[in-house]
């Protein structure tokens, strides 16, 4: 039989355990070493330097398939390479993450740039059969260190345009941009600049094709 004194002791013990659990939870949420989230930032009004300005080029409606990336890039990890050590090894930052995988971030900016250029983006399910289909593969989206203090963001995209199952045109786009700082924040800025420049090059190329 449980006595009142025993019940009070159990209640105090339960209250203490609950308090410790709350303190532990708060420390996990607010710990200073939690990963910092990054995206490509807001779309800049002025486009990166390109052979032609996307805003001045007419674009037909396009159906865009989700951008494909290699398996190692299909995550929220931010990768860098050390060309002076072992450039075959992509290394993830421990305390920095993308807000979503790079393919999704690039696709968001591509749709915004196409809309900015006066084009229309359709999903594959809603597009008419005669609407050109754009497929993009991202081969590289990493920060590349030439030395411990100097790095660039490197983006490599391959775009293919299909009309139904017929390949109309294909082209690769590679852009680099200097990182302002030798850390994750600098790499993110460089990758955002290089990625946006590659997308603007791609839109100018799309506008030059006879897709109507």
Image (cartoon, grey):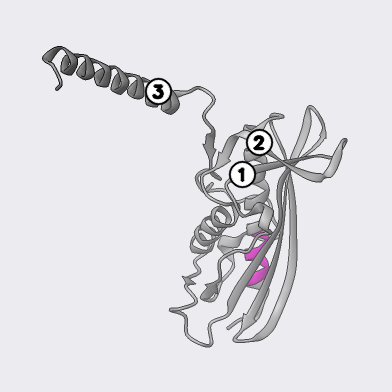
Please state, as top left, top right, bottom left or bottom right, where the N terminus lies in the image. top left
Q: Residue 24 bears which disc, if any? A: 3
Residue position marked by numbered label 2 in the rendering: 93
Point out the frontmost of discs 1 and 3.
Answer: 3
Decide which of 97, 110 is in the foreground and name it: 97
Name above or below for residue 208 compared with residue 168.
above
Crowding near the residue tagged with mark 3, few <14, some 14–19, many ≥20 C-alpha atoms within 10 Å = few
Decide which of 89, 204 is in the foreground and name it: 89
Name above or below for residue 120 compared with residue 94.
below
Image coords of residue 120 (percent x, y):
48, 70
Q: CA distance from mark 1 to mark 3?
A: 26 Å
* Residue ID at (49%, 66%): 118
Residue position marked by numbered label 1 in the rendering: 77
Crowding near the residue tagged with mark 2, few <14, some 14–19, many ≥20 C-alpha atoms within 10 Å = some
Q: CA distance from mark 2 to mark 3?
A: 26 Å
Magenta-colored span: 200-206
Q: Secondary structure at mark 2?
A: strand
Q: Secondary structure at mark 3?
A: helix
Secondary structure, magenta segment, majority class: helix
| Callout 1 touching callout 2 (CB < 8 Å) | yes
Image coords of residue 178 (percent x, y):
73, 38
Q: Is residue 203 highlighted in magenta? A: yes
* Residue ID at (69%, 59%): 70
Image coords of residue 99 (percent x, y):
51, 45
* Residue ID at (22%, 19%): 10
Q: CA distance from mark 1 to mark 2?
A: 7 Å
2 or 3: tag closer to the N-terminus? 3
């Amino acid at each position: 039989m449980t006595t009142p004194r025993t019940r009070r002791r159990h209640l105090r013990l339960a209250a203490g355990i609950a308090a410790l659990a709350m303190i532990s939870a708060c420390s996990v949420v607010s710990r200073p070493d939690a990963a910092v989230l990054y995206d490509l930032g807001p779309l800049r009004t002025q486009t990166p330097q390109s052979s032609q300005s996307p805003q001045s080029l007419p674009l037909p409606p396009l159906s865009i398939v989700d951008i494909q990336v290699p398996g190692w890039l299909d995550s929220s990890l931010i990768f860098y390479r050390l060309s002076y050590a072992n450039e075959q090894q992509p290394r993830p930052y421990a305390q920095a993450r993308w807000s979503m995988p790079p393919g999704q971030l690039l696709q968001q900016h591509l749709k915004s740039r196409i809309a900015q250029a006066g084009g229309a983006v359709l999903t594959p399910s809603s597009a008419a059969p005669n609407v050109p289909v754009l497929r993009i593969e991202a081969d590289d989206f990493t920060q590349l260190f030439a030395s411990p203090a100097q790095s660039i963001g490197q983006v490599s995209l391959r775009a293919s345009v299909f009309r139904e199952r017929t390949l109309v045109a294909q082209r690769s786009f590679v852009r680099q941009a200097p990182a302002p700082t030798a850390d994750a924040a600098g790499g993110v800025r460089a990758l955002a600049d290089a990625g946006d420049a590659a997308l603007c090059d791609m839109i100018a190329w799309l506008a030059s094709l006879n897709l109507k």
